[in-house]
């Protein structure tokens, strides 16, 4: 399995070594330039995909970072006589800082996602172009770099630029590969599918987006530095051309945005088609080939060329994913609920005091106070709209409480980000299952374990993830996508995913909703097994029979307030609880 996983990068490495020695064959300069342009687009498309493909933050302003690199080199070499090679890392740094500045603002605003992020990055490119055009950086006439001396890496200037283009392409593809295989890549893929859930599962979404944005921009800036000396004369119109953004998007879509090699394949196909036809009517032919190819891929291969080709290759070899990537279950390193050393076993593991939360004029929580003890199942019930799910959202950090205190084992967590709360040992499920749609069941659980209370490398988590899938009765579905599972299985996938984080507190939000009677009995037994592992459980449910069977204590909410708390069978007899569910006699 390891050999098959690394076969792709090995093939790329062999190809790169072969291309490295190609100038020694003294091929015509035309072919070196042709290959350089392919490397140029490979590096640009792959760098764009690190953020936009992996995390699905589609950027139409990639040309801004490319342009920042172009003009950094143009300025440093022509106005300050700095050696060209020194300007390449400087161009990468300027582009990365530009991305970091944009991301520090944009990524903190939840509303600036999707198409708004795309439009904002496009606006950044136009603003930067305007600044460059109306300042001494360019001023209008452009900048000549034809006299800038180049390092002698090859047999001539064209060979030197060819080799630098090859190096940047290899760096971009290598970065994409290693990111995709790392915790960072797994976190970005989770952000792609559901950013809010990714944060709740422990992914530091803001930091990961910043890293991906900076790496993406740095590579684009370095590409701009090399391309500046290749063209020899740079202008604002040619540098900040919208076609840069358009082509990198098309190349990534063609090759496959969720695969590290997809943009490189797409860039090779499109660039070769464009540059193979460079004169007269042939230019139109090249563009027509690209357009037709894209239409066919979108219709026939919506996931892109590389993912589709790999899937068909596996089917042709009769290697279904479940057999090709079989994983042996491994016992968890720490059981859910296992206390930290020195913790007071008698103290509440969770204590909420006078917690309040409003949405405009709607008071969702009105001074809620409750305590959860280690190993306890606390039932949390109430009519629809009483504030149960809002309380879970506030405890887990999806919403910030307006006032009050939320303490985990004596530590205030009310002001922490959701990913930090998850790392401290608070896990949850959702009323409507929200698995990561493009990750297999196994990878869904791997992610939760990798970012949970005991963080670790995804590869080392696969055995434990398989253990929790088998614990939940999903061992045979490890390599299926969530869309291939029924509601019952997706509910249990939520449980397996939560348990993989080794939580001290597990918050179950209507986990029985929509299940058949037999499935409910299975779920009740599973919840008891979870409690036996040591986790404290907050059990939100409308099925009162299940609540009475499972709960050690019961808390009832109504209009955001606690109206009753105590032993389950005593609480359900209280007049206020009966009135909340059935109405009063005078209503």
Image (cartoon, grey):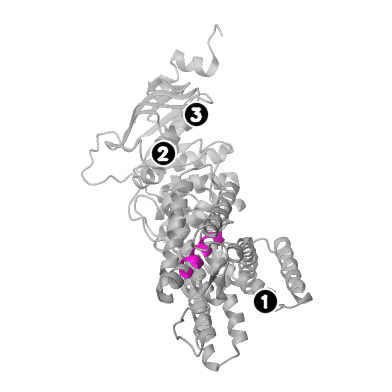
| Image location of residue 234, percent across then percent down | 56, 69
The residue that mark 3 highlights is: 545
Circle 2 sits on which residue?
397
In front of the other: label 3 or label 2? 2
Q: Determine whether the residue tagged by mark 2 lies in a helix, strand or loop.
A: loop
In the image, residue 330 above or below residue 177: above
The residue lying toward the viewer, choosing from 214 and 280, is 280
Q: Residue furthest right?
A: 281
Q: Quadrant of residue 531?
A: top left
- Mark 3 and mark 2 lie on one chain; the one further toward the N terminus is 2
Q: Residue furthest top?
A: 586
Taking the view exactly as shown, the residue that stands out farthest to the bottom is: 25
Quarter of the rendering containing residue 89: bottom left
Q: Which residue is mark 1?
A: 275
| Number of disc labels | 3
Q: Earlier in the sequence, mark 3 or mark 1?
A: 1
Residue closer to the observer: 135 or 20:
135
Looking at the rendered structure, the secondary structure element under dot 1 is: helix
């Amino acid at each position: 399995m390891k050999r098959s996983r690394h076969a792709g990068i090995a093939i790329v490495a062999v190809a790169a070594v072969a291309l490295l020695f190609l100038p020694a064959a003294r091929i015509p300069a035309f072919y070196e330039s042709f290959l350089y342009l392919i490397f140029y687009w490979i590096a640009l498309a792959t760098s764009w995909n690190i953020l936009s493909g992996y995390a699905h933050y589609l950027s139409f302003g990639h040309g801004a970072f490319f342009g920042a690199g172009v003009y950094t080199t143009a300025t440093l070499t022509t106005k300050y006589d700095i050696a060209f090679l020194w300007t390449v890392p400087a161009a990468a740094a300027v582009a990365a800082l530009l991305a970091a500045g944009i991301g520090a603002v944009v990524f903190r605003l939840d509303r600036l996602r999707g198409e708004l992020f795309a439009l904002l990055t496009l606006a950044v490119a136009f603003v930067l172009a305007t600044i460059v055009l109306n300042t001494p950086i360019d001023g209008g006439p452009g900048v000549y770099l034809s006299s800038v001396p180049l390092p002698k890496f090859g047999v001539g200037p064209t060979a030197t630029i060819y080799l630098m283009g090859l190096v940047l392409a290899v760096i971009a593809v290598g970065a994409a590969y290693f990111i995709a295989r790392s915790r960072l890549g797994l976190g970005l893929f989770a952000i792609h599918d559901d950013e809010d859930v990714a944060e709740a599962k422990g992914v530091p979404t803001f930091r990961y987006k910043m890293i991906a944005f900076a790496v993406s921009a740095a590579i684009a800036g370095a590409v701009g530095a090399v391309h500046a000396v290749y063209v020899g004369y740079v202008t604002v119109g040619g540098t900040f051309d919208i076609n840069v953004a358009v082509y990198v998007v098309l190349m990534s879509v063609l090759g496959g945005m969720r695969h590290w090699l997809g943009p490189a394949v797409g860039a090779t196909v499109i660039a070769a088609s464009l540059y193979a036809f460079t004169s007269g009517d042939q230019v139109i032919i090249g563009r027509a080939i690209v357009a037709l190819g894209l239409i066919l891929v979108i219709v026939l291969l919506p996931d892109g060329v590389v993912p589709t080709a790999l899937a068909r290759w596996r089917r042709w070899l009769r290697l279904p994913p479940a057999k090709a990537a079989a994983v042996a279950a491994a016992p968890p390193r720490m059981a859910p609920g296992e206390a930290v050393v020195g913790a007071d076993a008698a103290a509440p593991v969770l204590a909420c005091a006078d917690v309040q939360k409003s949405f405009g004029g709607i008071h969702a929580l009105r001074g809620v106070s409750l305590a959860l003890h280690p190993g306890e199942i606390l039932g949390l019930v109430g009519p629809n709209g009483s504030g149960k799910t809002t309380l879970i959202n506030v405890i887990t950090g999806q919403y910030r409480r307006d006032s009050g205190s939320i303490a985990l084992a004596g530590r205030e967590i009310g002001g922490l980000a959701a990913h930090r709360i998850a790392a401290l040992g608070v896990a949850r499920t959702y009323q409507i299952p929200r698995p990561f749609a493009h990750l297999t069941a196994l990878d869904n659980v791997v992610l939760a374990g990798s970012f949970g209370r005991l963080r670790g490398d995804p590869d080392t988590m696969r055995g434990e993830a398989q253990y929790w899938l088998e614990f939940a009765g999903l061992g045979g579905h490890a390599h299926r996508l969530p869309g291939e599972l029924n509601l019952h299985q997706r509910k249990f996938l939520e449980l397996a995913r939560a348990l993989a984080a080794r939580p001290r507190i597990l918050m179950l939000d209507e986990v029985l909703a929509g299940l058949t009677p037999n499935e409910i009995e299975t779920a009740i037994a599973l919840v008891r097994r979870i409690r036996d592992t040591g986790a404290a459980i907050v059990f939100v449910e409308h099925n009162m029979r299940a609540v009475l069977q499972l709960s050690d204590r019961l808390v009832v909410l109504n209009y955001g307030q606690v109206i009753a708390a105590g032993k389950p069978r005593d609480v359900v007899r209280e007049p206020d609880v009966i009135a909340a569910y059935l109405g009063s006699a005078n209503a």
